[in-house]
Image (cartoon, rainbow, N blue to C red):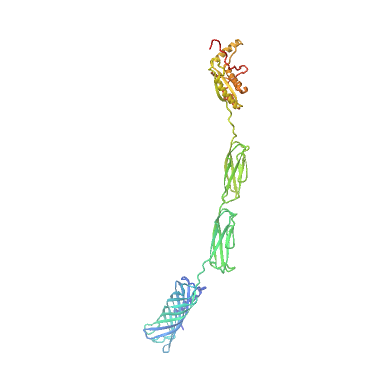
Amino acid sequence: MRISIRGKLLLASACILFGSALSAQQSPKPAATSSQVSTDLGVTFSLERSQVVPIVCCFWFKGGGADAAVTFWKGLGIAGTVTGDHKSNAEPGADINKIGYMAGPRYTLNLWAGKAAPPDPRRLQFFAQGLFGDSHGFNSVFPASGGATSSANSFAIQTGGGFNYYFTQHWGLRLVEADYVRTAFPNVGKNIQNDLRLSFGAAYHFQAAPPLPALTLACSVNPTSVFPGDPVTVTATAGNLLQKLNAIYSWSGTGVSGSGTTATVATASLTPGTYPVNASVKEGKPGKEGLLPGQTAACSGSFTVKAYEPPTISCTANPGTIKPGDAANITAVGVSPQNRPLTYSYTASAGTITGTGTTAEYSSAGALTGVVGITCNVSDDKGHTESSSTNLTITAPYVPPAPKTQALCSINFSTDTKRPTRVDNEAKACLDQVALDLKQQADAKAVIVADSNAKEKDTEAKEQKRAARNKHVKVEDFAAQRAVNAKDYLVTDQGIDASRISVMTGTGDNQSAQDYLVPAGANFSSDVQSGTAVDETAVKPKPRELPPMRQGKK
């Protein structure tokens, strides 16, 4: 038997199609999707009725075939067939044998037995196809060919469709397949044969396993922002791991330690900044993890180490004003934002302060009066320091004002022209008030300053001249006499100690006496313009009684 070159090419194509379909199948799964590659194989017995054009005779071929269809996308695919047919005594003593090799597109539709696809694998499969290729006849000729020939080749077309019923995941029956087959072997007439081919047999289904999803790994850092020493946990979550394979995790990064799905980070020695954390996973058979494509995955994350914040402090003094030698309480309120341990200290610009906790005691001993600055200091265990200041005031001790001489009432001696030095009732009223003040202030003293007018001073001057010539002439000092008489009333009538009363003469030009009260500690000489002290050994008080009236005078 000889096969044409075109026939050989079609046969090779069919073999390649079958081999590709078989090699593409991995662990067939019934859950087919529209994007999965599947292959259907069929082995059939066929009956083919051949009609020669022009119609000169009709006869049936008996034979069989094999076909393979690969579905690529949404039911669309390509199919290839190899058929062989035989007819005995097509003409007296003549047999006809032919082999066909064809390929072309095929559309496949699965009609599932249930409402959905597997787990129920039963389904009715419909397919429609359009094939073309080569048909080779040999050993005899078609009827009415006009002569015998040993072999012939013809371009062939086969269109039609059929039904497969799969009762398991792989196995089924070719219930029926009906195709129109057209060939062009030489014969008398138009060299055309129109055939109807009916086939049935067995079917086998391959479903390409869906590609395994790629291994993934996601990193989660908690928390993402910490202070030095705070714990950080990193978790790696792998996706699409196969349970039957071994998985190995590895970690890298500053301070990172871990071997499984979680790792920890030691942050105590880390300086402030951002730090990456990297993780990877490998899966595979023990000892062979990560050798195949898709068996490794990696992820990364990061965390931030923040600098410790310095503490804050406030400082108060109670009381805020003290006297020399007194003490005050100093209170410091320190706050660490990260609750670090705190240490306190205190300083003062004057005096002494003691304490190491939140309170201290200030002593003003040895400090001058005025404002004293107090400083409260706080530090944490990370070397941060902060200060706050307050003031207190040391006041000078109270010194009462120096007592001053007080001017009291004054006595007018001009009303009694005959006895201008006599203490009359009006003068007594004034001196009674002076006595009362002296009695109320037992440590006070009184000063009486008396004056004389110009006429009296002139009389005194004349008498002094006469006394210079005659020692028996007595000179009267009107101002001194008035002061002595007033004192005498205070001593004699009011019982005032004479040592508490001083008498003086002034420089005024009048007939009066001014009374002064000198409290203890007061200085009369600095408070009042000084006069002249009266010599009480020379000037004696005169009695207050009136002298008897002379005869003949009223």
Image height check: is 69 above or below 461? below
Q: Quadrant of residue 375?
A: top right
- Which sits in the foreground, 225 or 503? 503
Q: Residue at x 55, y 23 (%)?
A: 409
Residue at the far bottom in the pictured view: 92
Q: Position of residue 481 (x, y in %)?
A: 58, 17
The quarter of the picture where residue 146 lies is: bottom left
- On screen, residue 186 above or below 554: below
In this rendering, position of residue 507 left or right of residue 40: right
- Give 188 or 169, whichever is nearer the viewer: 169
Residue 478 x, y percent position in the rendering: 57, 16
Please tell me which residue lies in front, 294 or 122. 122
Q: Is residue 549 left or right of residue 72?
A: right
51 over 213 or under it: above or below: below
Q: Position of residue 64 (x, y in %)?
A: 46, 82
Q: Nearer the viewer, residue 135 or 40?
A: 40
Query: Quarter of the image holding residue 316?
Result: top right
Image coords of residue 381 (percent x, y): 61, 50
